[in-house]
Image (cartoon, rainbow, N blue to C red):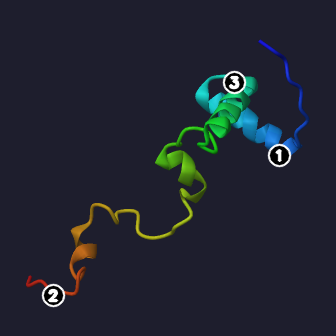
């Protein structure tokens, strides 16, 4: 295997380190996969999970803690008035 050296900014190095940790591999393996995907025309690494794509949004919305389980919040949902 050939060796290739490159310089990256601190921000990119941090992203590479985070990806390597997330995938349980090395930064070199992440870069190899990205270059191979780019060369194939995919333009990047394999698709990430929905959570990893939106994890910066987790906890950014405020509201009632029981929104997903309290049916009272759905009473007027959809425009139809329900009879009690």
Tag nearer the camera, 1 or 3:
3
Q: Residue at x 80, y 43 (%)?
A: 12
Which quadrant does the N terminus fall into?
Answer: top right
Is 73 left, or right, of 6 in this rendering? left
Task: Kindly give the residue lying farthest to the left in the view shown.
Answer: 83
Give me the C-alpha separation between circle 1 and circle 3: 18 Å
Q: Judge whether 41 appears above or below 3 on screen.
A: below
Q: Position of residue 11 (x, y in %)?
A: 83, 46
Left of 74 or right of it: where is 34? right
The CA distance from mark 1 to mark 2 is 52 Å
Q: Is residue 3 above or below residue 52?
A: above
Q: Residues within 10 Å of mark 2 (few under 14, many from 20)?
A: few
Pointers 1 and 2 in contact (C-beta within 8 Å): no
The answer to which quarter of the image holds residue 9 is top right
x 61%, y 24%: residue: 24
Task: Tell me the CA gap for discs 3 and 2.
Answer: 57 Å
Q: Quadrant of residue 8?
A: top right
Picture coordinates of residue 14, whole percent (x, y):
79, 39
Earlier residue among tags 3 and 2: 3
Q: Which residue is the site of mark 2?
A: 81
Give percent across and percent down for residue 5: 89, 26
Tell me which numbered mark, 1 or 2, is placed earlier along the sequence: 1
Q: Residue at x 89, y 32 (%)?
A: 6
- Residue denoted by label 3: 29
Mark closest to the chain's N terminus, 1 or 3: 1
Mark 3 or mark 2, whichever is nearer to me: 3
- Mark 2: secondary structure: loop
- Tell us which disc is closer to us: 1 or 2: 1
Residue marked by disc 1 = 11
From the viewer's side, name the closer residue of 68 and 4. 4
């Amino acid at each position: 295997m050939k060796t290739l050296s490159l310089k990256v900014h601190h921000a990119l190095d941090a992203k590479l380190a985070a990806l390597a940790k997330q995938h349980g591999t090395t930064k070199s393996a992440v870069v190899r996969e990205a270059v191979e995907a780019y060369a194939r025309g995919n333009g990047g690494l394999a698709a990430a999970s929905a959570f990893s794509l939106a994890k910066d949004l987790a906890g950014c919305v405020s509201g009632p803690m029981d929104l997903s389980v309290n049916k009272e919040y759905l009473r007027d949902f959809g425009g139809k008035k329900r009879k009690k």
